[in-house]
Amino acid sequence: MLLHLRISGRVQGVFYRASARDKALSLGLRGWVRNRRDGSVELVAAGDDEALARLAAWCERGPPSARVDIVERVVESVDSDIDDFPASFDVRPTV
């Protein structure tokens, strides 16, 4: 499965991306996370359904210094595009 989240609140400048990467890696997921210019964080992950559910639950809280107000969530079936995913979990530049 593929998990695509957009997280809003106080989620930039509070180690949200680095913490999300660490959590995703601990769950064996592949994908990426990045800041968006509108102040939100975008996360895309691929892997086991249970691990994705655990990551999504973590994203609703975030690291201790974050304040998560809204999590927009889209779950999709994985198709051949999964091959384009990083072999690990990346922190990408702001868009």
Image (cartoon, rainbow, N blue to C red):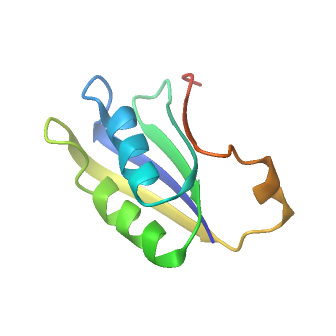
Which of 28 and 35 lies nearest the eye of the viewer? 28
Q: Is residue 84 above or below residue 93?
A: below
Furthest toward the right, the residue is: 80
Residue 90 x, y percent position in the rendering: 56, 36
Image location of residue 55, percent across then percent down: 39, 61
On the picture, is 78 further left or further right than 1? right
**Residue, x 63% and y 72% (percent of image)?**
1
Which of 57 and 90 lies nearest the eye of the viewer? 90
Quarter of the figure with residue 4: bottom right
Q: Is residue 87 above or below residue 57?
A: above
**In the picture, residue 50 is in which quadrant?**
bottom left
Locate residue 3 relative to residue 11 in the image: left or right: right
Decide: is 6 above or below 12. Answer: below
Q: Could you say where residue 49 lies in the image, as x and y percent from the top left?
A: 52, 76
Where's residue 80, x and y in %?
Answer: 85, 63
Which residue is situated farthest in the left direction here? 64
Q: Quadrant of the C terminus?
A: top right
How many numbered marks, from 0 up?
Answer: 0
Which residue is located at x 14 percent, y 35 percent?
A: 65
Q: Which residue sits at x=73%, y=69%?
A: 78
